[in-house]
Image (cartoon, grey):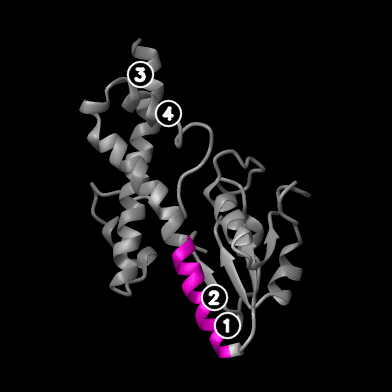
Amino acid sequence: KTAELVKLSENAYRDVNIAFANELSMIAAKYDIEINELISIANKHPRVNILNPGCGVGGHCIAVDPWFIASSMPKDTPLIQLARKVNQKKVFWTINIIESKIKNISLKKGRKIKIGIFGLSYKPNIDDLRESPALEIALELKNKGYLIYSCEPNISKHDLIEIFNAEYVLKEVDLSVFLVLHDEFKKLNLTNYEILDFCGL
């Protein structure tokens, strides 16, 4: 029993800490504060180690394991359940931010714009799409009728969304949205491009 709960506890602990970072990023955005700068300064405290926020939490462990604890003791796990809800909320918050930016650019250009989605996997430099918030965001935007061009350097094709290379997407679209911090994206020259960064690029 201890071994089983150890594994679940590890992932629930990470989920709670990511939830704090994600919630902090939403607060910082409302105050027009650069979240990466805020975290970098806060982490200079020797006993503070705030994680980097993202567009949600994915994968087959962190996004799932906390629910095993919560479902077995629903009345005794308010923090674990709340962390899950915060991380799920971050997906929809991200979509709202993207849609707001799309609306602004579309009004300026007087036409429907093209949107590039950079990163579909659930974390950097892997091809695993399980429970991926980035993939969920891309598919939700596509289902809403937006013109989506996706780039995921770790996979060559996907059944529901077409994959292009990074340079092509960057030049083709009006707005580039970075959801996953793949190493390939760090090498791109983003000067003079309209971008949204949700991964600390």
**Does residue 54 show up?**
no
> As rendered, which of 68 and 144 lies closer to the eye?
144
Q: Amino acid at mark 2?
A: Ile
The answer to whether residue 134 is left or right of residue 35 is right
- Compute the Cα span from label 2 to label 4: 35 Å
Q: CA distance from mark 3 to mark 1?
A: 50 Å
Where disc 2 sits, the SS reads helix
Q: Secondary structure at mark 3?
A: helix
Instruction: State the separation of the CA atoms marked 1 and 2.
Output: 6 Å
* Residue position marked by numbered label 1 in the rendering: 106
**Residue 102 circle label:** 2
Whichever of callouts 2 and 4 sits on the residue coming sooner in the sequence is 4
Q: Which quadrant holds residue 182? A: bottom right
Magenta region:
95-108
Q: Is residue 55 above or below residue 174?
A: above
- Helix, strand or loop status at disc 4: helix
Q: Earlier in the sequence, mark 3 or mark 1?
A: 3
- Residue 82 is tagged as none
Residue 13 pos. (x, y %): 33, 34
Foreground: disc 3 or disc 2: 2
C-alpha span from label 3 to label 2: 44 Å
- Residue at which label 4 appears: 65
Seen at 61% across and 84% down, the residue is 192
Residue at 44% x, 56% y: name it: 92
Kindly indicate the quadrant of the structure image that contains residue 70.
Answer: top left
Residue 129: image quadrant is: top right
Q: Which numbered mark, 4 or 3, is in the foreground of this view? A: 4
Q: Label 3: which residue?
A: 5
Is residue 108 visible in the rendered structure shown here? yes
Q: Residues within 10 Å of mark 1 (few under 14, many from 20)?
A: some
Question: Where is residue 120 drawn, in percent x and y?
Answer: 62, 52
